[in-house]
Image: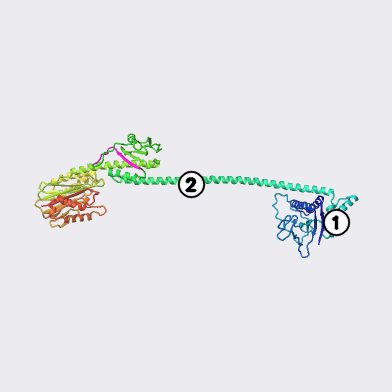
Amino acid sequence: MTAHDIWTIRSVADAARARTLLSRLTAETGLPAVERARFLTDVTARLRECLAAGGAEVLIEGVEPSPDGGGPDATPDGDGCGVDASGRDGFGVDASGRDGFELDAPDAAPDKDVPAADASDANAPAAAPAAPQDAATPRLRIVVRPDGAPPARYTLPRPRRSQRPAPEPRSPQQATAAQAQARPAERTAPAGPAEAPAQPAHLTPHDLAEAVLADAEDTAALLDLLAEQEDLVRFHREELHQTNQGVLALHAELEAAVQAQHELLDAERAARADAEKSRRLLTFLADASAAVTASLDPEDILRRLPELLIPDYAAQVDIWLFDEEPGEGQAPRRTDRPAAAVTAARTGRPQHAAPHPGGLPGVDDLPPSVLFPDRPLLCIPLTAPRLLGVLTLTAPGPRFDPDTAVMLMELAGRLAIALDHARRYEQHRDVAEALQRAQLTELPLTEGVALAARYLPATRGLNIGGDWYDAFVQPDGSVLAVIGDVTGHGLNAAVMMGQLRTALRAYAVEDDSPARILTRLHHMLCHQQPTLYATAVIARFRPGDPTLVWAAAGHPPAVVRSPDGTVQVLDARPGIMLGVPLPFTYEDHTLPLQPGSTVALYTDGLVERRAQGIDPGIERLAQAMGALSGADLEDLDASAEALLKPLLHDSERDDDVCLLLCRTR
């Protein structure tokens, strides 16, 4: 069942009284102040619109639950005042077709008052949208029906206590006047179980004043709630500001970290580039040092240096050696030297000549050179330890790199040492070779034996001065042919070779036995030169005696060619080397010789090669001697040359070479 009242609104006073009664109704429902204010504001706006359109009727009806648990259909038809194009009026029509403003109080148990949620509590969580009341719950429906327009409906929960506002006591005149005013808004439906609210006409000015005060209280509550919300907004705004400040600070820290990371990456790239550059310079320095120190020929060293530096490290290379003498077929020495090179030679310090300062470590800056005004020059003195000359380099680009300049100065120092060693080697070699040749014997001319000899110094290394040969005539007319090799090279070996030669001749005057002569030489070396060793072969040719007598001390075997071309290697077991600290007595060996036989005595430099050993060389010598004809052997000097050619086909020799040919007649 339903019970309803109809209020007729024709004036502003009617609208004010209706709003006052609706304010009381919403207060009794226990709705929060915000929801009440929202509802009353919307109703007031609609009443104003309706007054502008000529008036309206407000229907207040109480809706009881239907027996089947369903609710009445409250869907409006058509458009009207306060209804938008979608069919929703006021606060809209939901998806189910229900229109109006529906406010539901919190659920409560039967016959028990439950206070409404305090919307002013700022710390309480925001309330979720109110769910529609169940169909079995009594509700209060308010319908605003403008004249000639579709109505607007509002659904509220029923008041917790069905109370009709009791009118104030009034006088009979006041009651009569109130009844006269209430005639236009008489009830149109009987009262039911749900009692309808009082008519607006029943309100007195005192009621209106109380309603205004109640609205003021609601307004105060809203203002308090608004203040709390403003405080909460201010708090959140401050919190947001602090958060923003923190975010900005974090962003600044991240930017600083990114910048620091970029700087570290740049520093790492620069360090890697410097390390790669240093590695490249050190590698070049090592390779160039190995190239210039591998040779003992000054001309070869001076030829290699420009090939190493041009074009990566210098555009031009000039080496000024103070004691340089032009060789045969060479151009005369230059006389036009840059002023920076002269200054470097005078001061002994590196000089840099360019239009701009070089800033090179350990280098003095000078004005640009007149000879090279557009290109920087770097003049480095060559000191090892005496001043040998000046190395002048022309920059490959607009300037010299400091690290490259340091590497070039280090290379110049190593170049000076290599040149000094090469020159000392040449001097030492020349002296040793001169001494060696001075001590080689002029071969005697005898009737029974023809002699021919060849001596070739080593062309690689300082291996000069150890090989020697000798031939002399004994008092009885026999001829002793000797060939030997002293361990070691250079001046010391040449000097010891001279001592052995002199001692051997002295011992041969007293005794002509090759074995006994070697034995006495062995004793002498063990006593006077315990760290020096030598090898030797002594062969004796006696006129009228066709027997060859020889003895060997650790020396390669002699090779004999018979007149018929047969070749024999005298490979009898030799004795130990001369000077080995062991007591030893050498033995004589004999071999019958036919007239016209040729005996070849030689040193290991003729037959020994590093990659092949000595035996293949001895076989090649035997084959070469067998290839000689009898006519060739008539000229022993020519035969010696013919033997050297196939055995020394390459021009480089690691050791001295001695060859002594003896041909019987």
Towards the viewer: 278 or 166:
166
Towards the viewer: 35 or 587:
35
Up the image or down, 604 lies above or below 320; here it is below
For residue 610: magenta?
Answer: no
Q: Which residues are magenta?
A: 314-327
State left or right for residue 615 relative to residue 13: left
Towards the viewer: 215 or 585:
215
Counting from the top left corner in percent of width and height, residue 564 is at: 13, 57
Q: How many marks?
A: 2
Specify the quadrant of the image occupied by residue 596. Answer: bottom left
- What is the spatial separation of the Cα atoms under label 1 and label 2, in whole angstroms? 92 Å
Q: Nearer the viewer, mark 1 or mark 2?
A: 1
Counting from the top left corner in percent of width and height, residue 139 is at: 78, 58
State left or right for residue 377 relative to residue 602: right
Residue pictured at 53% horizontal, 46% vertical: 257
The residue to which callout 2 is attached is: 265
Characterize the local packing of mark 1: few (<14), some (14-19) or many (20 or more) Cα atoms within 10 angstroms: some
In the rendered structure, which amino acid carries the disc numbered 1?
Answer: Glu
Taking the view exactly as shown, the residue that stands out farthest to the left is 544
Q: Earlier in the sequence, mark 1 or mark 2?
A: 1
For residue 322: magenta?
Answer: yes
State left or right for residue 654 relative to residue 31: left
The residue to which callout 1 is attached is: 186
Res. 239 visible in picture: yes
What's the mark number on residue 329?
A: none
Res. 571 visible in picture: no
Counting from the top left corner in percent of width and height, residue 315 is at: 35, 42
Counting from the top left corner in percent of width and height, residue 153 is at: 76, 57
